[in-house]
Amino acid sequence: MFKGIGNLGNLGNMMKQLQEVQARMAQLQEELANKTVEGSAGGGMVTVIANGKQEIKSIRIDPGVISLNDIEMLQDLIVAAVNQAIEKSREMMAEEMSKLTGGIKIPGLTS
């Protein structure tokens, strides 16, 4: 007669677990904003620092690159360094999310 009551308890537990995961995700996002990775190109002539939220925090350019008067090369180095920093940031985020989810791939949550 009351078979559904047990299922309601399971649903309540699932909702509680979901809320806990959401709270841990919010905390993880704050932590990722404070963690950084570095991408570089041209043997370190251009260095880009990004955080775990894929935000570029800084770009360092060796003055020797500027004196070469080759703007196209400098642009290419910047693009390469930015792409490397973003990729490292994605990898860091995926690794941290994997720890949070126990390695389970959740669509839309991990890449």
Image: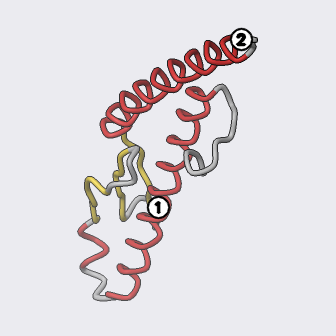
- The picture places residue 8, in percent across and down from the top left corner, at 62, 18
Mark 1, Cα crowd under 10 Å, few <14 / some 14-19 / many 20+, is few
Q: Amino acid at mark 2?
A: Phe
Q: Is residue 94 above or below residue 55?
A: above
The N terminus - image quarter: top right
**Residue at the spot 33% in from the left edge and 55% down from the top edge:** 55
Identify the residue under disc 2. 2
| Mark 2 secondary-structure assignment | loop
Left or right for 78, reference 66: right
Left or right for 51, reference 89: left
- The picture places residue 45, in percent across and down from the top left corner, at 37, 64
Identify the residue under disc 1. 43
Left or right for 20, reference 9: left
Mark 2, Cα crowd under 10 Å, few <14 / some 14-19 / many 20+, is few
Q: Nearer the viewer, residue 64 or 84?
A: 84
- The picture places residue 26, in percent across and down from the top left corner, at 37, 32
Q: Nearer the viewer, mark 2 or mark 1?
A: 2
- The picture places residue 62, in percent across and down from the top left corner, at 28, 64
**Residue at mark 2 to residue at mark 1: CA–CA distance:** 70 Å
Q: Amino acid at mark 1?
A: Gly
Q: Is residue 58 above or below residue 81?
A: above
Sequence-first disc among 2 and 1:
2
Whether pointer 2 and pointer 1 mark residues with C-beta atoms closer than 8 Å, the reply is no
Q: Nearer the viewer, residue 59 or 15?
A: 15
**Residue at the spot 28% in from the left edge and 65% down from the top edge:** 61
How many labels sit on residues? 2
Q: Quadrant of residue 78?
A: bottom left
| Mark 1 secondary-structure assignment | loop
Q: Nearer the viewer, residue 50 or 77?
A: 50
Find residue 62 and name its label: none
